[in-house]
Amino acid sequence: MTDLYTANREFLAPFDPNRPPDFWTVDWQLHSLRRLEDDRQAEMGERFLIEADGEPGGVISVSRVFRGPFQNAGIGYWVDKDLNGRGIATQAVHQVCEWGFGLARLHRIEAATLVDNVASQTVLRRNRFSEIGLSRNYLHIAGAWRDHLLFARTVED
């Protein structure tokens, strides 16, 4: 994970929140994986490594899992800069939706993209996500509060 994130550090910078310096270390990534295991046990989140040609190619995360009458989660994903445009993110989102609406028993999956991230919006639309609106100042990305387009898909879609 450390190598994958480090290799894509500049590529991800315009899309990511500011990261603390330790984020790029093995210790941080190991700690993150331990926290993820706690989330898994509590059915609060999941993270999948995206493979391409048998190699690590990106990450797709499921977070903000709400149970009860909502059965909702959010997803976020990215693919290595050299693998963009090959349908890898589209396939990864498809597989996570199958998992989410199947084994994870979700009813709704949400995602948010920067307004100008047309490639990510295309990935979502190809996976039958519907645009549900604009959220102003949604996340602090690359040093500024940025607007995002919100998308959702339900099991019925």
Image: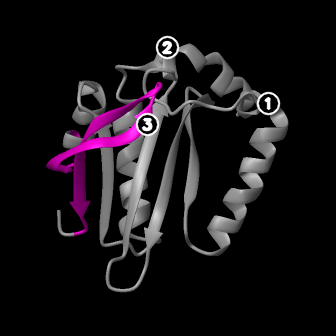
Q: Position of residue 52 (x, y in %)?
A: 53, 29
Q: Amino acid at mark 3?
A: His
User: Which mark sits nearer the N-terminus, 2 or 1?
Assistant: 1
Front residue of this view, candidates 30 and 123: 30
Q: Is residue 130 above or below residue 25?
A: below
Can you tell which quarter of the image residue 38 is in?
bottom right
Question: Which residue is pictured at 40% across the width and 63% down the height?
Answer: 73
| Real-space Cα separation, disc 2 to disc 3, in angstroms | 26 Å
Q: Amino acid at mark 2?
A: Asp
Residue that numbered label 3 is attached to? 140
Front residue of this view, candidates 72 and 19: 19
Mark 3 falls on what kind of element? strand
User: Which mark sits nearer the N-terminus, 2 or 3?
Assistant: 2
Answer few, some or many: residues within 10 Å of disc 2's Cα (few below 14, many 20 plus, some between 14 and 19): few
Magenta residues, start to end? 126-155
Q: Is residue 121 above or below residue 53?
A: below
Q: Amino acid at mark 1?
A: Thr
User: Which mark sits nearer the N-terminus, 3 or 1?
Assistant: 1
Q: Position of residue 53 (x, y in %)?
A: 56, 26
Nearer mark to the viewer, of 2 and 1: 1
Residue that numbered label 1 is attached to? 25
Answer few, some or many: residues within 10 Å of disc 1's Cα (few below 14, many 20 plus, some between 14 and 19): some
Residue that numbered label 2 is attached to? 82
Q: Residue furthest bottom?
A: 68
Nearer mark to the viewer, of 3 and 1: 3
Mark 2 falls on what kind of element? helix
Q: Residues at badges 2 and 1 in contact (C-beta under 8 Å)?
A: no
